[in-house]
Amino acid sequence: MPFDHLSLGVRDLGRSVAFYDAALVPLGLVRLSGSARSACYGPPGFEGEAPFAVIALGPDATPPEIGLHVAFAAPDRGAVDAFHAAAVAAGGVDDGPPGVRAAYDPGYYAAFIVDPDGHRLEAVVHEPVGPRASSK
């Protein structure tokens, strides 16, 4: 993995914690810690600097530029579907329903969400296709 951790600034930490607590569970990520300033997420039992966090920046936080995009790895299609459903139910905006994105790759199954602060999120699973898939 080419990065150590990623943090997103948010306007309303409580709202973001409720959103991410719901949206990340289907991907196997849980809240590892929290404070008045941040909430940190990773796999259950993870120790050290959490791979993902939201940081309270308050009303001065500005929506990210259109180029910001965070893609979370999903274990399977069901997790992608559950991420999308949970994220929408928790206040996210659909930015592309679950489905194969053949233009990227025939095995690319993903869903896209915009979180309550305007961050563009994706859950994706890369499935084997073609001759390689049948040999496994």
Image (spheres, rainbow, N blue to C red):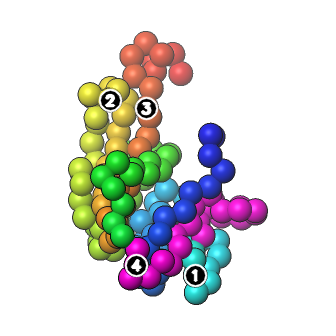
Secondary element at image label 2: loop
Viewer-side label of 2, 4:
4
Circles 1 and 4, Cβ within 8 Å, touching? The answer is: no
The residue where tag 3 is placed is: 127
Secondary element at image label 3: loop
Let me know if residue 88 is in the magenta part: no
Question: How far across and down, in percent of the image, does residue 42 sit?
Answer: 61, 61
Inter-mark Cα distance, 2 to 4 = 36 Å
Q: Which mark is residue 104?
A: 2
The residue where tag 1 is placed is: 37
The residue at the point 36 percent across, 70 percent down is: 62
Name the amino acid, label 3.
Glu
Viewer-side label of 3, 4:
4
Name the amino acid, label 2.
Tyr
The residue at the point 41 percent across, 44 percent down is: 124
Q: Quadrant of residue 12?
A: bottom left
Name the amino acid, label 4.
Asp
Secondary element at image label 4: helix
Seen from this angle, which residue lies furthest bottom? 36
* Residue 10 can be seen in this image: yes
